[in-house]
Image (spheres, rainbow, N blue to C red):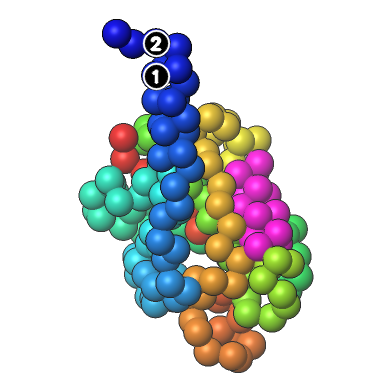
């Protein structure tokens, strides 16, 4: 016979299982190509309740990157969208209007600064891209943001050119 005590214990066990942490993706994995070199590899988004980039065929992400561009870049220590970034986001919004499904927007930074500061800056960059896409008509409930901070650089070098590539927001398509 199932008692209230059994139900409480089962609920507690399910809650603990849902809170289990997953292994973190190592810094720099999956982001070796610069955006101008064709369709970049996509980072593995955090696991959990959100969308997962691994479920979309590579051709979908590649088509998106080729037609609309999948990254926007930011100035040092900034989350403001400049002209080229707004142009890319307008192309992304048009592409997303023709193609259904959720998207993940991952904000990144260069290696300078503390981990905490860079995670917060990456979150502001992802939010800026998401907010711009929403203003262009992309449904907010299709979009999720994450910050990788300085943990997954496109270019691991410590040069101005590498840092400029690492200051970005990457829009990742997700299958259902």
Of residues 129 and 63, which is closer to you in this image?
A: 129
* Residue at horizontal 31 percent and vertical 35 percent from the top: 176
Kindly report the secondary structure that dominates the magenta region of the rendered protein: helix
For the residue carrying disc 1, how many other residues have a C-alpha within 10 Å: few (<14), some (14-19), or many (20+)? few
* Residue at horizontal 69 percent and vertical 81 percent from the top: 112
Label ID, residue 79: none
Of residues 21 and 174, which is closer to you in this image?
A: 21
Name which quarter of the figure residue 50 lies in. Answer: top left
Horizontal and vertical percent position of residue 175: 31, 40
Quadrant assignment for the N terminus: top left
* 147 sits to left or right of 116: left
* 35 sits to left or right of 41: right
For the residue carrying disc 2, how many other residues have a C-alpha within 10 Å: few (<14), some (14-19), or many (20+)? few
Indicate whether 128 appears above or below 1: below
Whole-number angstrom distance, CA of label 1 to CA of label 2: 5 Å
Residue 105 shows up from this direction: yes
Please report contact status of discs 1 and 2: CB closer than 8 Å, yes or no.
yes
Q: List the residue tagged with mark 1.
A: 6
Indicate whether 98 appears above or below 90: above
Name the secondary structure under disc 1: helix
Tell whether position 122 is magenta: yes
Name the secondary structure under disc 2: loop
Horizontal and vertical percent position of residue 22: 41, 55
Residue 74 shows up from this direction: no
Horizontal and vertical percent position of residue 16: 46, 39
* Residue at horizontal 41 percent and vertical 40 percent from the top: 17
Horizontal and vertical percent position of residue 43: 41, 62
Magenta residues, as a range?
119-132
Of residues 50 and 166, which is closer to you in this image?
A: 50
Q: List the residue tagged with mark 2.
A: 3
Tell whether position 170 is magenta: no
* Residue at horizontal 24 percent and vertical 53 percent from the top: 59
């Amino acid at each position: 016979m199932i008692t209230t005590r059994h139900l409480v214990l089962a609920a507690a066990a399910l809650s603990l299982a849902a809170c289990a942490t997953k292994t973190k993706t190592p810094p720099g994995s999956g982001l070796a190509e610069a955006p101008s070199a064709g369709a970049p590899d996509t980072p593995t988004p955090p696991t959990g309740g959100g969308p997962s980039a691994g479920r979309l065929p590579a051709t979908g992400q590649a088509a998106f990157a080729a037609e609309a561009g999948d990254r926007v870049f930011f100035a040092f220590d900034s989350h403001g969208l400049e002209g080229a970034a707004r142009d890319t986001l307008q192309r992304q919004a048009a592409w997303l209007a023709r193609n259904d499904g959720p998207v993940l927007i991952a904000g990144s930074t260069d290696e300078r600064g503390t981990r905490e500061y860079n995670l917060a800056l990456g979150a502001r960059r992802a939010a800026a891209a998401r907010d711009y896409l929403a203003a262009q008509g992309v449904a907010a409930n299709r979009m999720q943001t994450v910050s990788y901070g300085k943990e997954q650089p496109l270019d691991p070098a410590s040069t101005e050119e590498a840092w400029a590539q690492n200051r970005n927001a990457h829009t990742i398509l997700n299958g259902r």
